[in-house]
Amino acid sequence: MSRNFKLRPLESKSQSRSEKNGAIDRRAFMRLSFNTAAGLITLGALGSVGFASFLMGQSSGGSSDSSIKFYVPKGSDVWYSSMDKQPMTMQAFRDEAASSPTGMAGAAGLWSGLPIIATYVPHEENKNKPLSENEPRFQMMDGYTAGGAYVGSGFEIEEKEEYASLNIHDNMVIVFARCPHLCCIPGWQLVQNDFTNDNWLPGGTDSGGQKSFCICHSSRYDHTVIEKNTARNRSNGQEFDFIGVKKTGGPAPYGMPLIPFTVNGDTIEALPDFLDWYTFCG
Ligand code: FES
């Protein structure tokens, strides 16, 4: 996949909505998902260009912005509230993870207007320990279609050159955060339930916490499980394989794809590879 193009700069839109302080309810989440984060990729603004074309960015010229910014949903009380629209840094995640019983930390963000979730996992610290509760690490697993057909292994990011940019590094994974069910934007600990609590179980099961959670119809995703799966562009029917995190429960047919990234100094920057992976919502 070529990198010879420029991404559109992150737009800075005014956000006039007033939100109540406190927990986000379903209605607020839906509004935030579609009008705030996704508002930066609003279909109306895209017109006939289409979502996929938008993802491809500009062919040349113009400015680019590869940094990923924190995105604080209005009305939420998240650990990165004071860093809204600021570039994500590794240190911010390490600081937050230090106060977690699992050593994990996650945050919502925007990359070139696209919703993402970044998840810090103390993989290096735990990878050689016996698998046990609350000692998370990344787990490479086999991926299967909703019909049970084997697709591939998460180990392919280590074995195949085409996926080399996805090799796990810096104790972090970043996913393109649109739910493969009906394209809502899953959150990271924006609601509190058994799936989002700050505890972790090995094995990629639906049990245990530290899942991203889509409030629209309750799909859950384990960002510590890396698998290969098959997605389908709902607009043109095209199927394509991707490497992503595992869906553990709910109606979503598969997990969400990884976004390759690099750490520049301490700033987290996305790499514009695998853009076809981000088109499953049309
Ligand atoms: S859109 Fe996410 S579960 Fe339905």
Image (cartoon, rainbow, N blue to C red):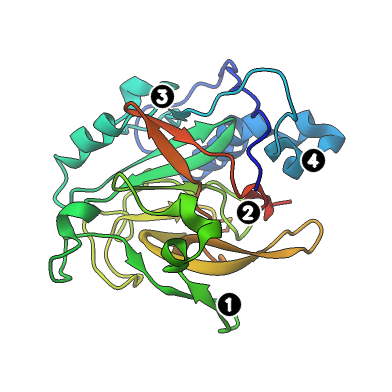
Looking at the rendered structure, the secondary structure element under dot 2 is helix
Looking at the rendered structure, the secondary structure element under dot 3 is loop
Residue 247 in view (yes/no): no
Residue 212 in view (yes/no): yes
- Residue behind mark 4: 50
Q: Residue drawn at (30%, 33%), measured in percent from left and top? A: 90
Identify the amino acid type marked 3.
Pro
> Which numbered disc flags the more N-terminal residue, 2 or 4?
4
- Residue behind mark 3: 87
From what the image shows, is residue 225 above or below residue 273? below
Residue 1's spot in the image, x, y percent?
65, 48
Identify the amino acid type marked 4.
Gly
Mark 2 vs mark 1, CA separation in Å: 18 Å
> Which numbered disc flags the more N-terminal residue, 3 or 2?
3
Circle 2 residues within 10 Å: few <14, some 14–19, many ≥20: many
In the rendered structure, find residue 277 and report the number of the disc placed on it.
2
From what the image shows, is residue 244 above or below residue 253? above
> Which numbered disc flags the more N-terminal residue, 1 or 3?
3
Mark 4 vs mark 3, CA separation in Å: 27 Å
Residue 50's spot in the image, x, y percent?
79, 40
61 sits to left or right of 163: right
Question: Is the distance from the Cβ of mark 4 to the nearest ligand 1 atom less than 8 Å?
Answer: no
Identify the amino acid type marked 1.
Ala
178 sits to left or right of 280: left
Judge by depth and name the residue closer to the eye, 185 or 116. 116
Mark 3 vs mark 2, CA separation in Å: 24 Å
In the rendered structure, find residue 146 and report the number of the disc placed on it.
1
Looking at the rendered structure, the secondary structure element under dot 1 is loop
